[in-house]
Image (tube, coloured by chain):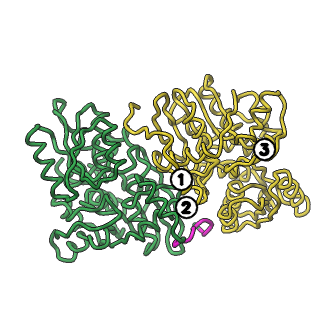
Chain colours: A green, B yellow
Amino acid sequence: MAELTIAAIRSAADAIAPHVLRTPVLEAVRPDAVLLCKAESLQPIGAFKLRGAFHAMQQLPADCPGVVAHSSGNHAQAVARAARLLGLSAVVVMPSDAPARKRAAAEADGAEVVEVSPDSEERERMADRLARERGLVPIPPYDDLRVATGQGTAALELLDDVGPIDRFYAPVSGGGLMAGCAVAVHALAPECEIIGVEPSGGDRLAASLASGSRELLPTPTTLADGLRVRRVGAVTWPILQAHVARSEPVTDDELLDAMAFAARNLRLVLEPSGAASLAVALREGRGRCGVLLSGGNAEPAVLARALARPVRWQDGAGLPS
Amino acid sequence: MAELTIAAIRSAADAIAPHVLRTPVLEAVRPDAVLLCKAESLQPIGAFKLRGAFHAMQQLPADCPGVVAHSSGNHAQAVARAARLLGLSAVVVMPSDAPARKRAAAEADGAEVVEVSPDSEERERMADRLARERGLVPIPPYDDLRVATGQGTAALELLDDVGPIDRFYAPVSGGGLMAGCAVAVHALAPECEIIGVEPSGGDRLAASLASGSRELLPTPTTLADGLRVRRVGAVTWPILQAHVARSEPVTDDELLDAMAFAARNLRLVLEPSGAASLAVALREGRGRCGVLLSGGNAEPAVLARALARPVRWQDGAGLPS
């Protein structure tokens, strides 16, 4: 694949359709906004990552000896699941602080898990080594056009379902989800403002957009375990720079309040990373806002903590929609 | 409408399509079963009740002075929402022990709420009186063929999406949901075993199937506030008798364990009544099981209680599907 285009995203959507769920769009009504929430948390592994993994792995040659991936959790599960369904063997490199249930899910799908320290660079080095030593094909978590094209199918479905939107919010880690989605959104809604969401203290896309070059930041301390990378990808960066208007920080308290809002008003379980875009949309959304809810693999104790907090955002039920 | 038939259900599905969500079917894999879970908890008001309310109210004359309904909560919300969108005024009679947020949601949609004691007969009497005194048109929660036909569209969508199933589980209160769904299921999967689920100690359908006549039981003590009626409906009973093979009891602990399973493995918030069918399917499901998840309006404290329990049902991720 040479380019990340809307035509490539449409083609990917057809290719992966048998393996992914066409997730519903759930509405939350706010005084100044309608939040059109794409519930990727309902994918079979609980995250959008299945889209990119299937799209990348469907293009491997029939004699592929297996794949290797590195991930804090959801990409590992996605690669493990896609490998099982496509008849490939998979090795996944996960940090020692990855949620136990994400690791268990990858193992249950038959993947070999290799544990490394929580630094995101260390994961990449180990995955590279395994690829060289065992001849495995790397499936990058984000910095790959096949993967980003697959992730973009989520935004394509959203806009196909709801029509034009004024704003689009998605979480940014390495930028694969946002790169694919941004291309889809701007193809179908050229005037839409595209807004990234990053952990407070680790907003490397915001820093990069400000400086004009790809910035390296310290690993952020955040409940959003899916958003702990130190910089956006080299492949995704020029696409992000071309399409993303701004990227907004989100605190742990805001993540918890968004998880509680989702549980009460959308009846969805979201993990902290999966609630990041909703947190910012609740804070500042105006007009018709597309909101990508990226994952639902919450640790039960974290969800319980969110539910125990005082209600911050009002239930929108009954407001004019 | 004279009869509850698959043709009537298909026609209802077309009529209500602009107002209801085509909810996704989420899979849970168990050692002896695949649970094909129809997530009606994701409907805009958080419950399947929107289907029947819209179908009944779309057939009212243009000069209708307004509607009246009685409900422990979800039907009240459904009638309030449908009335607002169809430009009607609505009065809803709710028991004093209805969840506060269900009452608040009906009020937010512009309905007038009249509070009565928790007895289900008392609700009916008050709704009848309001209908007589104010000329309002009653929208029954279940004992009405228009309503049951509307509810049946949920099972129609499920079977259209997943094909034939071996078993179908749905909660039974007055029997409107089950009557409509049973007709749809048997039309599309004639050999399917149809299984009701009722609160332990209040299994009036099980008692009625055993005796051959419609039994009146005491109001059950159960966390499932949507399943606290004393007997199935007069209109729904012959349909239930013709289609439902058996009806199984479910305890509060089983409801909580099913809520926890749904949160962890389906990433769904379910209310106790909404988890009832899943609780029985987890306990005894075999083969391809359709499972109707009826509602997601859980009180946060009840969900937190479910999450704090030891894990009873294993995560099915990674098992062959």
The circle on residue A264 is 2
Near-viewer residue (B218 or A9): B218
In this view, A251 is above or below A124: below
Q: Magenta stretch: give its range.
A: A312-320
Residue located beneath label 3 in the image: B144
The answer to whether marks 2 and 1 mark residues whose Cβ atoms lie closer than 8 Å is: yes
Q: Secondary structure at mark 2?
A: helix
Label 1: few (<14), some or many (≥20) within 10 Å? many
The rendered magenta stretch, by its main secondary structure, is classed as loop
Residue located beneath label 1 in the image: B269
Q: Secondary structure at mark 1?
A: loop
Q: Secondary structure at mark 3?
A: loop
In whole angstroms, how far apart are the C-alphas of marks 2 and 1? 8 Å
In whole angstroms, how far apart are the C-alphas of marks 1 and 3? 29 Å
In whole angstroms, how far apart are the C-alphas of marks 3 and 2? 30 Å
The answer to whether marks 1 and 3 mark residues whose Cβ atoms lie closer than 8 Å is: no
Q: Is residue B191 magenta?
A: no
Q: Is residue A315 magenta?
A: yes
Q: Position of residue A83 (x, y in %)?
A: 27, 37
Do dots 1 and 3 share one subunit?
yes
Mark yes or no: residue A49 visible: yes
Q: Quadrant of the C terminus of chain A?
A: bottom right
Residue found at x 59% / y 49%: B17
Label 3: few (<14), some or many (≥20) within 10 Å? some
Seen as rendered, the residue at the extreme front is B310
Q: Which kind of residue does numbered mark 2 sit on?
A: Arg
- Chain that bears disc 3: B
